[in-house]
Image (spheres, rainbow, N blue to C red):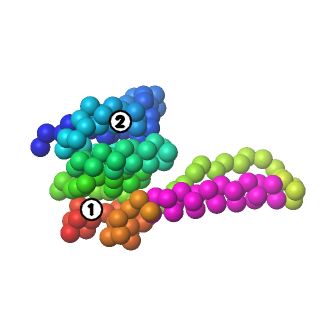
Amino acid sequence: MKYGMMICGTIGAGYDWWSGTYGTRSKDVKAYLDAHPDEEVDIAVSSPGGYVDEGLTIYQLIKDHKHVNVHILGMTASIATVLCMGAKHVDMSVGSTMLIHNASTGVAVWESANKAKLDELIKDWQKQRDGLDTIDKVIASAMPRNRARQAMKSWLRWKRAVG
């Protein structure tokens, strides 16, 4: 199989200094799809995920193009799995996996707090939680109503996901 594009690395990241690798940004996908209007294209995906906003943009770009076949290779997780769902056709190679999970965010507090400060922290965290709930609903709406959507928060091997 010849792939016209490979979506890999951290979604939404250019160069990742931590891992020394390059990710895939929505502008990269847009440039590729714009160069192939009205053509059927094959895109390979193998990514641990990344930034939700970039992944949702890539999902929509793929969906709007209408002629994209996505081929999941190796491990595809998190928002990388979601962006695949915009394709006309999705398949998985034998031995590949995909992960779907609820949105998450980093939480860190290293301080002493009285009751007033705790109330402030709880209020801030509740806002974050509400935001995550909204993101979960958006992600779920992008997923097809099949086994993948029912399997939020789990790894799917190729046979379970496509069989």
Q: Does any portion of residue 103 appear in the rendered image?
A: yes
User: Which residue is pictured at 17% across the width and 56% down the height?
Assistant: 94
User: Which residue is pictured at 44% across the width and 34% down the height?
Assistant: 13
Q: Which residue appears farthest toward the front when viewing the image?
A: 38
Disc 2 residue type (three-letter) = Lys
**Which element carries disc 2, helix, strand or loop?**
helix
- Above-or-below relation of 64 to 137: above
User: Which residue is pictured at 45% across the width and 63% down the height?
Assistant: 140
Which sits in the foreground, 126 or 19?
126
- Return the residue at label 1: 157
Q: Which of marks 1 and 2 is in front?
A: 2
**Which element carries disc 1, helix, strand or loop?**
strand
Span colored in magenta: 119-140
For marks 1 and 2, the one nearer the N-term is 2
Residue 37, x across and y down, in percent: 25, 37
User: Magenta stretch: dominant SS?
Assistant: helix
Residue 113, x across and y down, in percent: 83, 53
Q: Dot 2: within a 10 Å radius of its alpha carbon, few (fewer than 14), some, or many (20 or more) residues?
A: some
Q: Quadrant of residue 128?
A: bottom right
User: Which residue is pictured at 82% across the width and 59% down the height?
Assistant: 119
Disc 1 residue type (three-letter) = Arg
Which sits in the foreground, 34 or 128?
34
